[in-house]
């Protein structure tokens, strides 16, 4: 542990530390008319964060709140005190800006990322390939800061330039890498094409992978093609939480396909039911909601990430010694996409996984039909297509998918099996869930 | 001036400061076997830099010296002490890496760039759009550091995203910009297309433009389309000199289309005849050769930039108060491309300028033919094409080009005028200079 006095706190001591910082945060936000207005919407004042149930009752924050305050939303310092801004990607509109003071960058973010790097096993004096993007996106700059803080030599290549990277991985003997998992897979492919064997020619020992969630099977396949002992550790964070600073696997949680909420002393992560906003329990799925405790310039309180995750069945007291830094699974979907059918949460991505894994289906053609009462789904049906070359009866294919879905979801779902070419195709983003309203 | 005690030194005091630092540099380099070998090639030792003529006799350094020492050439600290590497672009092979220690980045580069920004008029508390690229290229990261050092709020967008940038220039009221001149021209165009008038809707006051050399006419045209008082200041630097840290215009030198060698206390810039390596005098053209005085990790001594520049006719004692920071013109070409004909330096770019400015020529089709003796050009001829639509005699067109060239170069050059479509065309890089060897 880079910071054992913090990282090994038990859950109660961690909660006490968070409570003190929440009270201080409330004091700071009280100076901001914007933040006071925001809390007033639910009849609260920022200073109420000092109460035991203050955070639990505080209003959530989402993109629409920020868009309404363009161009510098909810900033708690004057713009001139901001060292630099980062922004969300802006795929659904203008990017939303988040400010960072000098302290936010160098005393907070740098330390958060250094802790994550140390947690996966990166050590001072090592050489790291930095493969996340730069510019307004926080990924690359945050890892530059973390590597610098930890005393690791950074090769800030960013994404792309794969041919150069595979050669330098060999010639410069890079120990660690920060990059997206798909780009790591691409590097392995390019290396082989150029006659470089990652297993023998590289010494890469650790990768901190993020930006997208990949399955354990995918990671294990990557690891099998890499030098002995290499591990690709999942990481998770968002611009709104202040960077790639929320979750990171340790060597123990990695084996369970889980991550520690590694910076709980500076970023509170609640896992909440996306409808009731009540905390979910161990083993249950909820939405990640983050609050920044120490950030000066663009703090958030209860920012709705829309990312869904399952809390570990045994979230505390990891073998690594991190007692009060709970563990979560990998990100399993977006709450925007989630269905709740007869009390069971269903993600289209789960349905897609099952259909893709069943021989005889047409991979790109499938739908979920939902019956609703007052907008809430009451039942669902899945429609698939039977590949023209499938040599069994369509009903057999439907049974096979139904069995796998039942086992995956714990829910019996009727399957309609149609001839190939009869379900809708989508040129861009597919609309997988179609609603049949009750008349 | 951000550092008046240094920036206002007279030339003699500046040279004394450089001499002290050269002696210290020699001591440091003496610890490196690579550097000792390099100096030994000309019968010298790094400690000879302490002599009055030490630098003038030291060996020059070029890309081939570094490529021969792949992957970490001439590094004077252990790789583990390097915070991050930057690299040359690698257009002619693998990029060459240059290391920066924590001190190189934060106590040297950050201060050098902050000084440049202050010189053009950027002030603490302002908002700056950072439009240079990131990753291994030093442009973006160096300006991030400089803006941070000066206390300017950085919007690190990088190049691209023009539609977003033109809107934010208005809505976020950016005061300053660091970017390439061609991208600034592009932004103005995009703004007009979107109904944004840079003159009225933006408040941008200063731009620090570099990455490519543009004419005074081009800059003045840019400035005319921008808010009143806006200035686009030329800047110059290279990865090898430790960043964008060599030349910057002040408000006075800007008017003369010149730049100060603004960091002469940390980067010595010699302007040398590319053949004799002797210094050229005021008003003369030579190659920029740089030596880093304070850089810890990848110092250079007499790095040949291949960039050619004219020293000001009156290089010292600028009206801005910078007495010993000499002024140079803008970069006028590469020494690789330079011709010396009957004692006159000729750059293909000058010939191109003249042809492009003469009505009736075909812009893309022209050649320079050179007669040589023992590899040295003795005479040159320029071949042009006469546009099929030109309504005068080809000899008139040839005369017009000859007159303009004579006035531009101070050299009488015979012109051959050919019919349209008869000279070579080039799909990629043109070979404008063709040699006729003596038999």
Image: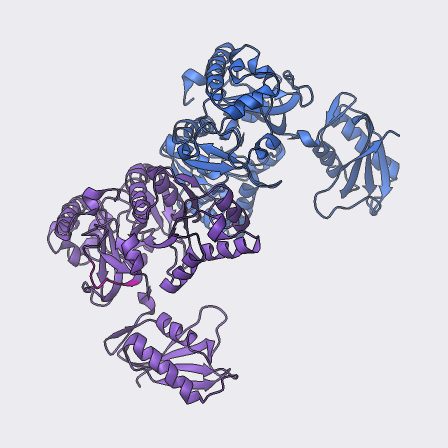
Chain colours: A blue, B purple
Asked if residue B310 lies in the magenta stretch, the reply is yes
Question: Vertically, is B297 above or below A64?
Answer: below
Please say whether residue A260 is visible from this viewpoint. Answer: no
Q: Nearer the viewer, residue B235 or A398?
A: B235
A229 with respect to B63 (left or right): right
State the residue at coordinates (21%, 57%).
Answer: B59
Q: Where is residue B16 shown, x and y percent of the image?
A: 12, 48
Is residue B362 within the magenta segment?
A: no
The boundaries of the magenta stretch are B308-315
Q: Would you say residue B341 is visible in this rendering?
A: yes
Residue visible at 51% across and 10% down? A12
The location of residue B321, given as percent across then percent down, is 21, 50
The percent coordinates of residue B104 (x first, y second) are: 29, 41
Does residue A339 appear left or right of residue A32 in this picture? right
Give how far across and how far down residue B185 sits, in percent.
46, 57
**Is residue A289 shown above or below A70?**
above
Q: Main secondary structure of the magenta part?
A: loop
Q: Determine the residue located farthest toward the left in the rendered image.
A: B52
Q: Judge whether A79 appears above or below B175 on screen.
A: above
Vertical placement of residue B91 versus B204, above or below:
below
Quadrant of the image occupied by residue A307: top right
Total count of labels: 0
Answer with left or right where residue A379 lies relative to residue B174.
right
Q: Quadrant of the N terminus of chain B?
A: top left
Quadrant location, the C terminus of chain B: bottom left
Give A273 or A126, whichever is nearer the viewer: A273
Depth check, front residue: A376 or A204: A376
């Amino acid at each position: 542990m880079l910071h054992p006095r913090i990282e090994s706190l038990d859950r109660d001591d961690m909660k006490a530390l968070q409570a003190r910082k929440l009270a201080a945060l409330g004091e700071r936000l009280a100076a901001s008319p914007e933040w006071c207005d925001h809390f007033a919407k639910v009849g609260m004042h920022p200073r109420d964060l000092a109460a035991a149930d203050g955070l639990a009752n505080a209003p959530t924050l989402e993109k629409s709140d920020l868009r309404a305050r363009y161009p510098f939303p909810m900033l708690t310092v004057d713009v001139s005190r901001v060292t630099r801004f980062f922004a969300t990607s802006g795929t659904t509109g203008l990017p939303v800006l988040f400010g960072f003071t000098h302290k936010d960058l160098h005393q907070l973010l740098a330390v958060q990322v250094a802790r994550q790097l140390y947690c996966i096993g990166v050590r001072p004096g090592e050489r790291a390939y930095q493969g996340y993007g730069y510019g307004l996106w926080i990924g690359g700059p945050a890892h530059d800061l973390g590597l610098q803080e930890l005393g690791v030599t950074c090769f800030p290549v960013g994404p792309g330039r794969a041919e150069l990277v595979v050669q330098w991985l060999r010639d410069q003997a890079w120990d660690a890498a920060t990059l997206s998992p798909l780009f790591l897979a691409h590097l392995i492919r390019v290396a082989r094409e150029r006659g470089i064997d990652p297993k023998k020619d590289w010494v890469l020992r650790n990768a901190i992978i993020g930006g997208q969630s990949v399955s354990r099977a995918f990671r294990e396949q990557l690891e099998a093609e890499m030098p002995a002992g290499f591990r690709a550790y999942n990481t998770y964070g968002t611009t709104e939480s202040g960077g790639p600073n929320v979750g990171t696997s340790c060597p123990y949680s990695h084996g369970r396909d889980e991550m520690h909420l590694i910076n709980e002393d500076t970023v509170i992560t609640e896992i909440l039911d996306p409808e009731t906003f009540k905390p979910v329990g161990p083993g249950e799925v909820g939405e990640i909601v983050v609050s920044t405790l120490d950030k000066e310039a663009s703090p958030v309180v209860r920012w709705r990430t829309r990312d869904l995750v399952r809390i570990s069945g045994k979230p505390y007291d990891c073998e690594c010694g991190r007692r009060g830094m709970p563990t979560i699974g990998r990100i399993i979907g977006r709450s925007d996409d989630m269905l709740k059918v007869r009390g069971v949460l269903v993600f289209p991505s789960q349905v897609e996984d099952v259909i893709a894994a069943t021989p005889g289906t047409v991979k790109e053609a499938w739908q979920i039909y939902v019956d609703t009462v007052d907008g809430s789904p009451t039942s669902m049906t899945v429609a698939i297509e039977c590949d023209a070359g499938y040599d069994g009866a369509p009903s057999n294919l439907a049974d096979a998918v139904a069995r796998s879905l039942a086992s995956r979801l714990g829910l019996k779902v009727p399957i309609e099996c149609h001839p190939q070419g009869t379900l809708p195709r989508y040129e861009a983003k597919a609309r997988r869930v179609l609603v049949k309203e009750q008349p």
